[in-house]
Amino acid sequence: MNSSMSEKSMKSSRYLLCLVTISMSLLILSSIFLLRSSSVALINGSVFRQILVNNSSAYIRPNTNNNSDRSLDTTSRISGKVPNQNSQISIASKEVIEETIGRRNVCDTNQALLKIFMYDLPPEFHFGLLGWKGNGNQIWPDVSKLNRIPSYPGGLNLQHSIEYWLTLDLLASNTPSIMRPCSAIRVLNSTQADAIFVPFFSSLSYNRHSKTHGKGKKSLNRLLQERLVDFLVRRDEWKRWGGKDHIILAHHPNSMLNVRKQLGSAMLVLADFGRYPVEIANIDKDIIVPYRHVVRSVNGDSADFNRRPILVYFQGAIYRKDGGFIRQELYYLLKDEKDVHFTFGSVHGSGINKAAQGMSSSKFCLNIAGDTPSSNRLFDAISSHCVPVIISDEIELPYEDILDYSEFCIFVPASDAMKKGFLLNLLKRIKRDKWTKMWEKLKDVAKHFEYQYPSQPGDAVDMIWEAISRKISSTSSVQLRLHRRNRFRQTQLMGNIK
């Protein structure tokens, strides 16, 4: 009997030991699994990419510099690049993907800040100018797929590409798979609209088709302008308010040159007022928007005060017409000064890359009036986080009703800038702490000057729609006057203007 009891006790002990061993093994495995899941996503990157492509707004390709073990980037957009088949787009983070999947049809008519009716003009007025041809009676390209969106020409053409980005954004507002801000949405009934958008790529038309071919013939650019006027004046939408609720883009200073008087009642979207009589274009009814910068954006790798050896930088055309004579005067004053880079430059060869390197290595970048009061050089400087020095008395600035440019720019009257020693003495008195404060502000506002597709909250496209909304509601004038008064405040406080 004792033997039988002993055998039962041994079997029981073995059973308990086995149970304990299994339990301990499961506990260890569970701990390892929990530890791994706290630092590594449970769904790998390839699965996330498949989810994003099938369910969200972003159309992505893995960055060639990334591998599957690296953390996913926090953005999923083209930043400052023209969409095309070869674009490299960052991978979205897990949080962005999850949020996107849950918010596909975000924008609706009631949520939008602006309701925009856009004319279905024939492609010859817009994407047809880029060589795009639709199928049959197709008017617009499929904006849900990046490889189907016509690319915009590079070089200096890009600086006036505003009409391209705004038109793409309106088309995207009716594309459920594209995630974008709800600032503006396209409506198909003009009676529901706050404004009427005219999708004519006028700057591109001027740049590419303003030359005449054959004796006595009109250029294609002029013919398109005349056809546009004929179309608009016959529309009930134009007749209703005489065109005052229409938005016409004429960013290049020579665009729409032949028909400005006929269309001057509309809200014009411009680079400046340099070549317009005040009765056609003025700050009360029109808006100024930024150039699309042509140098690359610095983004996170922005050199601080000590890593910018050049004090003052300018590279560009020196001999200009009209108010641009000041460039020539400053060239002779500054060209031989220490720590100053003031030379002729162009976009040919590696000109844009050299300008990008120079601006990102400089503390101050000169923005001097040329043939017109403005140039894309200001926005190249902002994207390079180089504190702009604006020497252009007649300049108008984008979003100045909500941005105080004196916080990140230096304004110098042209008459003072041409005094020997004045400009350099002024800039040398701005020490590291003050410069760094302006540099930090530059990094904060630079996003407002980025054109991209799809648009993002607070970028250039989003800011333009908001500026149009403020203009329509007449809520911009008071703050604009205050900020304009601040332009020369810093120079005056430093005791340089008597």
Image (cartoon, rainbow, N blue to C red):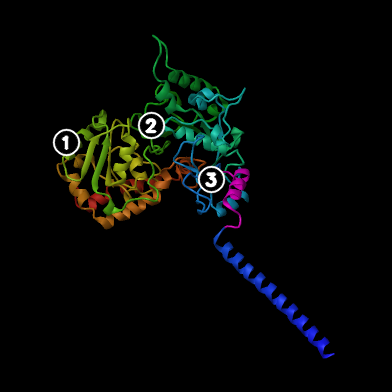
Disc 2 vs disc 1: which is toward the camera?
2
Q: Which mark is residue 332?
A: 1
Q: Secondary structure at mark 2?
A: helix
The answer to whether residue 403 is magenta is: no
Residue in view at x 23 percent, y 50 percent:
492
Most foreground residue, 335 or 477: 335
Q: Secondary structure at mark 1?
A: helix
Say what amino acid the circle numbered 3 marks.
Pro
| Residue placed furthest toward the left | 420
| Residue placed furthest toward the bottom | 2
Give the class, few, some or many, for how many residues have Cα within 10 Å of label 3's Cα (few <14, many ≥20).
many
Q: Position of residue 387 (x, y in %)?
A: 30, 47
Is residue 105 at all visible to an observer of this figure? no
Q: Secondary structure at mark 3?
A: loop
The answer to whether residue 55 is magenta is: yes
Q: Quadrant of residue 368?
A: top left
Q: Is residue 7 above or below residue 488?
A: below
Query: Disc 3 or 2, which lies upstream in sequence?
Result: 2
Looking at the image, do the residues carrying marks 3 and 2 touch, with CB atoms under 8 Å apart? no
Residue 59 placement, left or right of 464? right
Q: Position of residue 480 (x, y in %)?
A: 38, 45
Give the class, few, some or many, for how many residues have Cα within 10 Å of label 2's Cα (few <14, many ≥20).
few
Say what amino acid the circle numbered 1 marks.
Tyr
Say what amino acid the circle numbered 2 marks.
Gly
Looking at the image, do the residues carrying marks 3 and 1 touch, with CB atoms under 8 Å apart? no
Q: Which residues are magenta?
A: 41-57
Residue highlighted by disc 3: 181
Query: Disc 3 or 1, which lies upstream in sequence?
Result: 3
**For the residues marked 3 and 1, what is the alpha-carbon distance in whole angstroms?**
48 Å
Q: Is residue 136 above or below residue 29?
A: above
Residue highlighted by disc 2: 155
**For the residues marked 3 and 2, what is the alpha-carbon distance in whole angstroms?**
28 Å
